[in-house]
Amino acid sequence: MKFAVAFDHAGVPFRELVMATLSAGGHEPVDLGEQDDYPDVAVIVGRAVASSDYERGVLVCGSGAGVAVAACKLPGIRAAVGHEPYTASQMVTHDDCNVLCLGARVVGPALAELCVAAFAQAVFSNEERHVRRLGKVMEIERGSGTK
């Protein structure tokens, strides 16, 4: 799987770890660089994933929250913070998230590695309830909301 990866100034310490973890899992990570401001990296990765040039993305800032908020403003992007392996996996299997957001000031390198690996290995379940819920999320994105 091809991954778009980028970092703000606080996320740079995890650059090698994210790239190596994805490569070790048999994926193709592409480092799209770093910027001082988290909205800039969120847009870079979000647009890359939304364009379908990349299947998924990984964004790293200080907390993970800033890049998640900014990335979710882009159509087609479902980004979430995954600071432990369960959420990093479940956000794909249940919610079909396509961007993992990490906080380099929140989790240590060993935990970050587990989260990146869990996110990369996860597959959307396609269970009826998850498809139904994802459809409702897509309605919200289109502006029609739910009910």
Image (cartoon, rainbow, N blue to C red):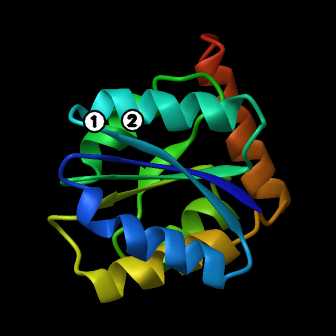
* Residue at mark 2: 41
Left or right, residue 92 beside residue 31:
right
Where is residue 125? Give x, y as percent. 79, 66
- The tally of labels here is 2
The picture quadrant where one finds residue 91 is bottom right
Say left or right for 52 vs 20. right
Residues packed near mark 2 inside 10 Å, few (<14), some (14 to 19) or many (20 plus) = many
Q: Relative to 114, does residue 88 appear above or below in the rendering?
A: above
Compare residues 7 and 63 and report the one nearer the observer: 7
For label 1, the crowd category at 10 Å Cα-Cα, with few meaning under 14, some 14 to 19 and many 20 or more, is many
Residue under circle 1?
38
Give the side of residue 122 with respect to residue 101, left or right: right
C-beta proximity under 8 Å, tags 1 and 2: yes
Q: Which mark is residue 130?
A: none
**Real-space Cα separation, disc 1 to disc 2, in angstroms:** 5 Å
Secondary structure type for disc 1: helix
- For image coordinates 72% across by 45% down, the residue present is 54
**What residue lies at 46% left-to-right and 70% top-to-bottom?**
18
Task: Determine if residue 72 is in view.
Answer: no
